[in-house]
């Protein structure tokens, strides 16, 4: 089965590279470092006393979520360096911004495509002592090559939905074989652990969700406070990490469920869509400003601020009075609501949160979040909460308490990873 999987990779590789070049029209980063995606690298990664830890964080979300793990690994193992791999230019840019402080102890490259030959070149070039995959990144050839080169593989902050488990079953023994090649899995919840065992994983421990250990820096808190000052005295609804199609629903619903004097801040998840969303706002005749061109204060006639900046999500949450978490109005699986809760911002979510089912359901149960049926219901609920300071503040306090109660996953994970480093 893995032989057939590898053949499909080689057959589709020209189309994969063509798509890469096509995506580079809007996001030039996709046209950079293409050789790395094929397993060719210019220089070696930093190695301290010969020990290199390799951590794969596919895109922005995983790169940001890995921050407490990276910090803890480099603190606990001062004789190690870290190689951070990505698959998207936005993930790589986020890593460059977040981890520049580690200097030569941290190096970034793209992970090669999952063919045995390319992964083998990668492993021979960097010779890592340990491979750490984040959340759902199970690649059959990567794991097989790591096993062949005696590089132990760990899957951390792991999650697996029922939908993904059913999908894995359709691939015969391919993913089961890959799961059996993982030396250690740190699962977010007991339900995730049970599904991972059904998928074929052997060594699974429940450590909790590392994302609860992500904390805003003082600089980001200051940036959020400054942003709040620019918004003036108006209440602010943040629609964070919205996905394609959701902005249309929200902007259309705004006519049926207006926010009154409140300001709507709309932050698309993918930067290549900033201009498309700007055109949608203009098409509805709404007065708006871009985050990148905000003056000292948002004029009172502005109805929408388009968040066209990267790496500022904590600042947006600090500046907002209420946050809707995108990816949940349409069947896209939702996005992470933990960052909003961590700074005490109450949360609204849609019906579709299957990728973050546990944290979403727990947040609703704890009174930190409210689930809404559609965009109109979301704006109606937002208007009610923005007009009720006491209820909203109490909800924000519960959000903060919920985030604090679930910290500690990073320390548990690193303690269990230690034996794999030898």
Image (cartoon, helix red, strand yellow):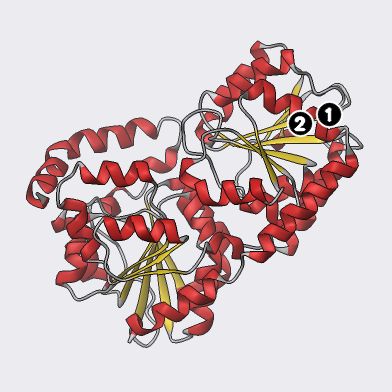
Q: Name the residue at 41% across, 30% down.
A: 25
Q: Can residue 110 be seen at all in this image of the molecule?
A: no
Using the image, tell me which numbered label, if any, was put on residue 289. Answer: none
Residue in front for this viewpoint, 263 or 95: 263
Q: Name the residue at 40% across, 77% down.
A: 417
Q: Residues under labels 2 and 1: Cα distance?
A: 10 Å
Few, some or many C-alpha atoms within 10 Å of disc 2 (few <14, some 14-19, many ≥20)? many
Name above or below for residue 251 compared with residue 321.
above
Q: Quadrant of residue 79?
A: bottom left
Horizontal side of 139 relative to 56 (left or right) equals: left
CB under 8 Å between discs 2 and 1: yes
Name above or below for residue 360 compared with residue 157.
above
Say which residue label 1 marks: 262
Few, some or many C-alpha atoms within 10 Å of disc 1 (few <14, some 14-19, many ≥20)? many
Q: Which sits earlier in the primary sequence, circle 2 or circle 1?
A: 1
Horizontal side of 139 relative to 416 (left or right) equals: left
SS at circle 1: loop
Say which residue label 2 marks: 382
Horizontal side of 417 relative to 293 (left or right) equals: left
Q: Can residue 4 be seen at all in this image of the molecule?
A: yes
**Picture coordinates of residue 400, whole percent (x, y):** 74, 57
């Amino acid at each position: 089965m893995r032989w057939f999987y590898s053949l499909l990779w080689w057959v589709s590789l020209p189309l994969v590279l063509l798509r890469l070049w096509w995506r580079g029209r809007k996001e030039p980063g996709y046209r950079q470092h293409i050789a790395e995606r094929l397993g060719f690298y210019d220089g070696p990664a930093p190695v301290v006393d010969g020990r290199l830890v390799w951590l794969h964080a596919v895109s922005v979300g995983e790169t940001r979520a890995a921050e407490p793990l990276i910090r803890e690994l480099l603190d606990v193992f001062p004789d190690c360096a870290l190689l951070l791999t990505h698959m998207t230019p936005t993930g790589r840019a986020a890593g460059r911004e977040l981890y520049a402080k580690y200097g030569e102890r941290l190096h970034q490259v793209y992970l090669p495509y999952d063919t045995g030959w390319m992964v083998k070149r990668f492993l021979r070039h960097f010779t890592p002592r340990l491979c750490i995959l984040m959340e759902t990144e199970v690649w059959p050839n990567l794991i097989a090559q790591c096993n062949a080169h005696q590089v132990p593989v760990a899957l951390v902050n792991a999650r697996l939905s029922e939908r993904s488990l059913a999908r894995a079953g359709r691939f015969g023994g391919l993913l089961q074989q890959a799961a059996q090649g993982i030396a250690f899995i740190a699962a977010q919840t007991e339900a995730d652990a049970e599904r991972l065992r059904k998928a074929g994983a052997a060594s699974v421990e429940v450590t909790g969700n590392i994302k609860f250990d992500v904390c805003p820096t003082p600089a980001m808190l200051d940036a959020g406070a400054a942003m709040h000052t620019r918004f003036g005295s108006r209440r602010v609804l943040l629609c964070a990490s919205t996905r394609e199609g959701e902005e249309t629903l929200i902007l259309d619903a705004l006519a049926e469920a207006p926010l009154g004097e409140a300001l709507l801040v709309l932050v698309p998840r993918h930067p290549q869509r900033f201009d498309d969303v700007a055109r949608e706002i203009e098409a509805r005749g709404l007065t708006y400003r871009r985050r990148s061109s905000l003056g000292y204060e948002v004029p009172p006639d502005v109805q929408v601020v388009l968040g066209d900046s990267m790496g500022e999500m904590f600042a947006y949450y600090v500046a907002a009075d209420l946050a809707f978490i995108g990816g949940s109005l349409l069947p896209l699986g939702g996005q992470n609501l933990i960052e909003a809760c961590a700074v005490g911002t109450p949360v609204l979510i849609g019906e579709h949160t299957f990728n973050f089912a546990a944290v979403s359901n727990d947040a609703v149960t704890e009174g930190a979040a409210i689930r809404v049926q559609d965009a109109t219901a979301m704006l109606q609920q937002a208007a009610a909460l923005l007009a009720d300071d006491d209820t909203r503040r109490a909800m924000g306090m519960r959000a903060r308490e919920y985030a604090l109660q679930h910290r500690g996953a990073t320390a548990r994970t690193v303690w269990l990873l230690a034996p794999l480093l030898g």
